[in-house]
Image: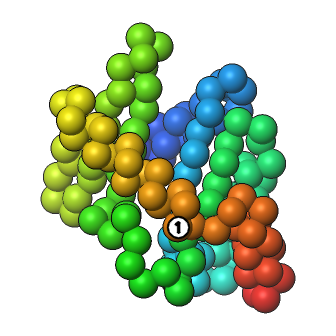
Amino acid sequence: EQIEAQLAARLERQELLRNRPNTAFTFILEEHLFLRQLGGEEVTRELIDHVLDLSELRNVDIQIMPLVRHHHAGLDGPMQLLETPDHQWLGYLEGQEHGQFISDPKVISALQMRCASMRSQALSLDDSKGLMRRMRGAR
């Protein structure tokens, strides 16, 4: 029941990408996410197709952080940044055993700079799509 509830919540969150065309969404994904083939080749193929489909939405930017980038600003783990309708920035950092909600403007500023650095270190939008298409074709 818990897994089904979590899956339903995740699918509902994903619908926001399509239901909010005036909201910008930016994602930076590690290349190893696709290379690991978690779940097998068919699951990986479906994942790549799904991400490529999302990357065609005008409000969604998806960049790939290549494996050859041994050091980058996101090595401390996943982070989420969001801006409220009142233009307040919030963050969420996730670890293996806990998550941390951030509202301190000084910390948010540092996270925004880290995110900007990651965007410059990742592949461009077009190069990211090209890499995913090549990985899709190689399977």
Q: Is residue 44 left or right of residue 8?
A: right
- Identify the element where label 1 is drawn: helix
Q: Is residue 39 left or right of residue 41?
A: left
Q: Which quadrant of the figure has residue 46? A: bottom right
Residue 92 position, x and y percent, is 29, 42
Counting the numbered discs, the total is 1
Residue 10 position, x and y percent, is 49, 43
Asked if residue 113 is positioned above or below residue 119 in the image, the reply reads above
Q: Is residue 3 visible?
A: no
Question: Measuring 45% from the left and 58% from the top, which residue is drawn there?
Answer: 117
Question: Measuring 64% from the left and 55% from the top, which residue is drawn there?
Answer: 62
The residue that disc 1 covers is 121
Q: How is the image coloured?
A: rainbow
Residue 48 position, x and y percent, is 70, 67
The local crowd at label 1, few if under 14, some if 14 to 19, many if 20 or more residues have their Cα within 10 Å, is some
Q: Which quadrant of the figure has residue 77? A: bottom left
Q: Quadrant of the C terminus?
A: bottom right
Q: Quadrant of the N terminus?
A: top left
Name of the residue lying farthest toward the top: 86
Asked if residue 76 is positioned above or below residue 116 in the image, the reply reads below
Q: Amino acid at mark 1?
A: Gln
Question: Measuring 64% from the left and 68% from the top, which residue is drawn there?
Answer: 123
Q: Is residue 128 visible?
A: yes
Residue 119 position, x and y percent, is 54, 57
Question: Measuring 38% from the left and 48% from the top, which residue is drawn there?
Answer: 113
Asked if residue 132 is positioned above or below residue 21 in the image, the reply reads below
